[in-house]
Image (cartoon, rainbow, N blue to C red):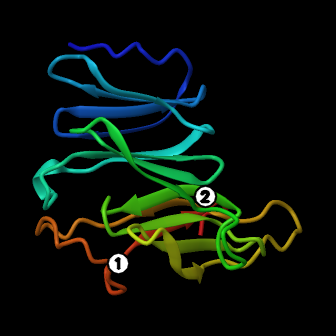
């Protein structure tokens, strides 16, 4: 049994892949541990409280590298190469365009070519935005829900899931025909 007690505040998101565990706490800390040794291999402070985090699968990566990613409540998506223990990307995903997001709550990424982020647009619509990671630019957005008719809080995307095809990795390219599941704060 291994106990990871480096985080002193409540955990707000977590991910695991192989022997790695990644977790972020409400004090803005993001830590990745190796379950075999129990040692932290990455310990970083985000600019805001994490809303989502993820680990890549090294066996599915063309480079054989494992990456950690964290999205904070300010909309900043950061990626780290765990082999180099270095940050490889810092991408501000909110307030970058009128069609983009004002809040970002969740993401999916292949860690090298694309990132999908879910949240709320400036209009109050639940929205998903596709980013080109190498060029660090937004390339498309989809409005998925009408604003809250009662005039309350904006609706936003809370979860993005890519159903497993059972065939393993299908490459880095994002394709429109790949099915995605998402849920907004309205439950739709």
Q: In this view, does 7 lie above or below 44?
A: above
Q: Residue 179 carries which label?
A: 1
Please give the name of the residue rendered at 45% of the width and 63% of the height, measured from the top-left corner. Answer: 160
The secondary element bearing badge 1 is classed as: loop
Q: Is residue 174 above or below residue 90?
A: below
Q: Which residue of the protein is positioned furthest toward the right in this rendering? A: 151
Residue 9: percent from left, percent from top: 56, 19
Q: Residue 77 carries which label?
A: none
Neighbours of disc 1 within 10 Å: few (<14), some (14-19), many (20+): few
The residue closer to the viewer here, 186 or 46, is 46
Residue 10: percent from left, percent from top: 55, 23
Residue carrying label 2:
104
Q: Quadrant of the N terminus?
A: top left
Residue 20: percent from left, percent from top: 23, 33
- Quarter of the image for residue 87 reads top left
The secondary element bearing badge 2 is classed as: strand
């Amino acid at each position: 049994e291994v106990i990871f007690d480096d985080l002193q505040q409540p955990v707000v998101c977590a991910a695991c892949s192989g022997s790695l565990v990644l977790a972020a706490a409400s004090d803005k800390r993001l830590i990745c541990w190796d379950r075999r040794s129990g040692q932290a291999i990455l310990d970083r402070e985000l600019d805001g409280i994490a809303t989502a985090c993820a680990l890549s699968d090294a066996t599915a990566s063309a480079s054989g590298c494992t990456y950690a990613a964290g999205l904070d409540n300010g909309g900043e998506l950061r990626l780290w190469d765990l082999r180099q223990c270095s940050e490889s990307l810092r991408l501000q995903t909110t307030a970058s365009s009128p069609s983009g997001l004002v809040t970002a709550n969740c993401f999916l990424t292949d860690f090298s070519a694309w990132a999908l982020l879910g949240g709320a647009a400036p209009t109050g619509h639940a929205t998903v935005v596709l980013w080109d990671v190498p060029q660090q630019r937004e390339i498309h957005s989809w409005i998925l829900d009408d604003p809250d008719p009662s005039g309350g809080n904006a609706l936003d995307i809370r979860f993005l899931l890519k159903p497993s095809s059972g065939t393993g990795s299908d490459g880095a390219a994002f394709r429109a025909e790949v099915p995605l599941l998402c849920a907004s704060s309205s439950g739709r």
